[in-house]
Image (cartoon, rainbow, N blue to C red):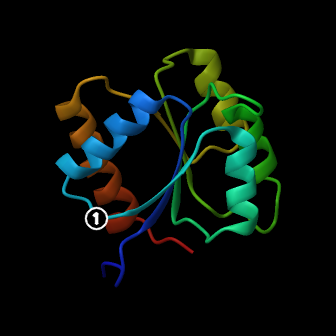
């Protein structure tokens, strides 16, 4: 059963162009969400600890002040936050990055498409899986 209100997503991304591309991809996917944006890892941790609890986090890896790997490491050992699903959404296709993220209990690792159509398709797939198939806490 679909949620009665739009899902709340936390996008952790420091690149303004990628934030804009993500917003366009969400629009292209016709996905109505409440989107909160954190521009660095420390801001993401602050939002997770004090803000409204997101249904899903889209986390870039290369962030200032506290990178995505550190965010994963901190969140996934915190009993208050560890059940929030985190999708690593990054341009890195490095096997070392993929392994490091799963070792830190990322729920999913996706390589960010650079093409708007492909990004829209990815957003539709995320919506279908995380909000259509998966049952979230």
x and y, in percent, of residue 35 in the image: 44, 58
In the rendered structure, the answer to whether residue 48 lies left or right of residue 133 reads: right
Vertical relation: 68 (above or below) 123: above
Q: Decide: is 8 above or below 44.
A: below
Q: Is residue 67 visible?
A: yes
In front of the other: 30 or 102: 30
Residue 110, x across and y down, in percent: 44, 34
User: Relative to 33, is 105 above or below?
Assistant: above
Pinpoint residue 28: horizontal percent, then vertical percent.
18, 47
Residue under pointer 1: 32
Horizontal side, residue 6 vs residue 124: left or right = right
Give the position of the N terminus as an image quadrant.
bottom left
Q: Residue at x 78, y 69 (%)?
A: 80
Say which residue appears at 76% left-offset and 34% top-offset. 66
**Badge 1 density bin: few <14, some 14–19, many ≥20, Cα 10 Å:** few
| Occupied quadrant, residue 25 | top left
**14 up-or-down from 74: above or below:** above
Name the residue rendered at 36%, 66% in the picture: 131
């Amino acid at each position: 059963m679909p949620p009665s209100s739009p899902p709340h997503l936390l996008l952790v991304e420091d690149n303004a162009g990628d934030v804009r591309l993500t917003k366009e991809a969400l629009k292209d996917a016709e996905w109505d969400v409440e989107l909160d944006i954190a521009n660095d890892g420390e801001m993401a941790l602050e939002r997770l600890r004090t803000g409204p609890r997101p249904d899903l986090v889209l986390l870039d890896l290369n962030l200032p002040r506290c990178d995505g790997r550190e965010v994963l490491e901190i969140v996934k050992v915190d009993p208050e936050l560890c059940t929030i699903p985190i999708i690593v959404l990054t341009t890195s296709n490095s096997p070392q990055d993929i392994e490091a993220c799963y070792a830190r209990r990322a729920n999913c690792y996706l390589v960010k498409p650079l093409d708007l159509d492909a990004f829209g398709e990815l957003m539709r797939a995320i919506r279908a899986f995380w909000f259509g198939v998966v049952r979230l806490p």
